[in-house]
Image: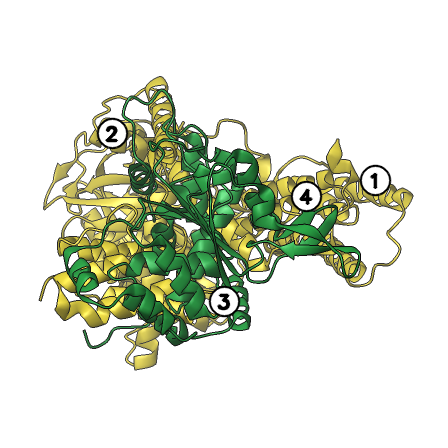
Chain colours: A green, B yellow
Amino acid sequence: MAQNSAILQPGMNALLDGIVERLGEIILGKEHQLRLALTCLLARGHLLIEDLPGVGKTTLAHSLATVLGLHYQRIQFTSDLLPADILGVSIYNRDTGEFQFHPGPVFSHIVLADEINRATPKTQSALLEAMEEHQITVEGQTRELPQPFFVIATQNPLYQIGTFPLPESQLDRFLMCIELGYPDAGAERELLRGADRRTLLAGIEPLMSAGQLLELQRQVDSVHAADALLDYLQALLDFTRQSPRYQNGLSPRAGLALLHSAKAWALLAGRDLVLPEDLQTVLPVVVGHRLQAAEDQTESLSGSERVRVLLESVPLP
Amino acid sequence: MQGHATTLSARTQTWLLAAVVLVVLPHLPRMPGWITLFAIGVGLFKLLLLRRPWHQPPRMLLALLTVAASAAVFFYYSTLLGKQAGVALLIVMLALKLLELHTLRDARLVIYLSYFLVITNFLFTQTIPIAVYMFVATLVITAALSAITHTSRQRPVGSHLRLAAVLLAQALPIMLVLFVFFPRVAGPLWGLPKDAYAGMTGLSDSMTPGAISSLAQSGATAFRVEFFGPAPAAELRYWRGPVLWHTDGRTWSPGRIGSYPRKPPDAVQNRGEALRYAVTLEGHDKPWLLALDLPVQISTRAVYTVDFQWLSYRPVRERIRYEATSWPHYDTGPLHSPLRKAALQLPEGVSPRVQELARDWRARADNDRAVVQQALDYFRSQPFVYTLQPPLLGDDPVDEFLFETRRGFCEHYAAAFVVLMRSAGVPARVVTGYQGGEYNPVGDYWLIRQADAHAWAEVWLPAAGWLRVDPTAAVAPERIEHPLDLDLQAAGTPARFRLLETGLLVRSWRRLQFAVDAVNNHWNQWVLSYGPQRQLELLAALGFRQASWREMALTLLLLIGGCLLGIALWMLLRTPGPSDPVLQAWQRYCKHLARLNIRRGASEGPRDFARRAIAAHPELAAQVCSITELYIRLRYGKPLQDSHEVKQLQQLVRRFPQHAG
């Protein structure tokens, strides 16, 4: 294919491409998920990973932080975790005679909230508020969180014992919900053969700074979404609201989330305009966790099937 | 009403002014000078008001002007009804209304009045140029209607005109259906104003010296003839009109006897072949239907008279078309005594000189035929001059013409000849009509003008019946072969004829004239003379035998209803195609690929589709890439100002190979 054009070929953003490549060296065979995670970050959203333990969620979060030159903290959610364990506490300093605030792990660029559905709703909501507001209020004092601020939460499959499922309104705060899944045979073989991931992680040099990331986030806003694309987006939203298949239609916030994600995906692919394909690519991960099948539907569709029906039902002129 | 609050913008008023100017313009030459001046004056004043918002004329003044103008029209025409007066009044009122454009209602009134005034053009003339002009005027009026309706946004001039054109185009099918199927009745549905037929020219039912020569100076069309077969020679192309029996010495009239009906062809015997042809006769406000000498059959309802004329039941006031059969060589058989008596009638006081001449011929001849021959020889040998502008004649025109002036047009010769024949005891009468005609090679028909009007004589001979004798032919044989040249006539001089023209320029000019007349002829035949008869013929051809009024009305209703239903269904059922040229081009491209068995999924994006297409047809990669890239840039990229890239996309799609190489 000699005459391949910029529009037909993804990956013209050299910097972002380098990052994807470097991450791909650590997390094998998951390029699409890596790109989605990066997209989520670029779109200033938070990521929910719904998967079994041991598929590489922590590695993903850690390597992402390292490559991007960001500060990283991990919080293991348990049923006895308290809000203060996340946000931080004020402790009386005997030397100065004052209360001094000790910031919690939430004060970092990337926060990995592991097994978020193991904690009580009270603790969950403390984190979720921080995600929404990008600031926390402790003891009447409001404190800004660092920029950029990115939460990667992982969630065990809901049938596991001892979980507090996140309510729909809370799920809505996550821009994307992805599944990592098992690696394929080739990737797994390489994984088994290769060096320890931790050693690899330690050797990674950051490829960009937090400032550069903020600049990229600003660039996302300037990616052009034409009227034709907005028409298509609105048709998609409208379908979820009209169809009896779904319990509730997509909210305006979901629409904005879709548009932002598509823009970020386009930027990641080195384009300054959004294609319908961008929208279609991010649709499953943005919409899947927001769209519930109606209760009276006899056929219970899984998240990806619900999205597939949606995609096939709305024609693109 | 909400409309009253609206004040019309200058732009809207300009539209109205333009419409009114277009509508009034063709009427102005027909109007008396003061109305023309008034209309132009008001128009200019309005233009001034538009350019410089000055004081609007006070209401009182306008009312006064209105009353004064109506009164002026009334006193000028002594009526407000009728074609001329009515149109004059409308023009005056429309012009004044322009000074009183305040509300939407005023504007609407101007529009509707303009529509009406456009139609009145047809009362005066029905030519193709005026029809085209009226179409343009209607377009502008409709555009003005659009301009007064769309006041909310300033739209460019072109958009109003475009909308008007679309509306007119949509009205066209209904217009055609109405034209073809609207029940046509013979004669107008309501009485046309008395002056509607003024200005129709043609032969009169009486003949005085100078009557035909004045007609012969008109270049207007009398009728057109298509022969179903070869045309007869010039000496046989005598078109029979009124036959004149009675004379008082100066004026010739038909007399009572001539109009008696008879059954065609009665005792007439054919002595040669029969000629069939179709005549399209212009309206001339008289009943006679002109036909080639000697007509024996005609396709329209008419009476056949004892002197072989076909008379319509009512005056021919609009163009009609009929087919006729004539026998150019004939024998009319015996002459009955009342007719013989009428054919020998002489006015009182035929001068002794005339009687002497006739007696002399009679004495020297042994039969009537020899008398006729001597008379023709006399005209030929004496210094007679054929002229279009003969000197005026006194109380005894025949005597004066024969012995003194000896300059005359055909009516002088025919009248003198018949008086001489009757004096010699030979039954004779004057026949008026047309002679000759001009062949139009473009339309393959003969054009007979008023200039071809002619008068000749008929004598009755025992062995042959009525025989046509043309004394003019004895004096000026060229008259029979060539039409008169109207441009070259001078008082008292011999008539000039149009002989062979050899110059290329002249010939091309003639050819152009022929072509124009041929187009006019078709227009007349198929548009203007589409009357009850033609409609019946057409309906019969469509399978409506003896269609009645009611059936026609029902057909019309069904057709229009069907049309509207069809349009409604179409609007209801059609899947609206994209109006966006970019999307149109894209969908055409998708169709091209579908023919190559690459069908785009309902929600497949352009890039995914292009990848699939390239995978299936790598040889098309270049085209697919450039089309997709351009499409994406146009549809999903930032909006562009120029349409150059849209054209490029359309071009690429057009050039896209539609069949697998």
Mark 1 is surrounded, within 10 Å at the Cα level, by few (under 14), some (14 to 19) or many (20 or more) other residues, namely few
Q: Residue furthest front?
A: A94
| Rendered image quadrant of residue B192 | top right
**Which of label 4 and label 2 is nearer to you?**
4
**Which of label 3 and label 4 is nearer to you?**
3
CB atoms of marks 3 and 4 within 8 Å: no
Q: Are the residues under marks 2 and 1 on the same chain?
A: yes
Going by the image, does B97 lie left or right of A17? right
For mark 1, what is the residue?
B67
For mark 3, what is the residue?
A70
For mark 4, what is the residue?
B110
Element assignment for label 4: helix
* Distance between mark 4 and mark 2 Cα atoms: 67 Å
- Dot 1 falls on which chain? B
**Which of label 1 and label 3 is nearer to you?**
3
Q: Which of marks 2 and 1 is nearer the N terminus?
A: 1
* Distance between mark 4 and mark 1 Cα atoms: 19 Å
Q: Is residue A104 above or below residue B257?
A: below
Measuring 34% from the left and 53% from the top, which residue is drawn there?
A281
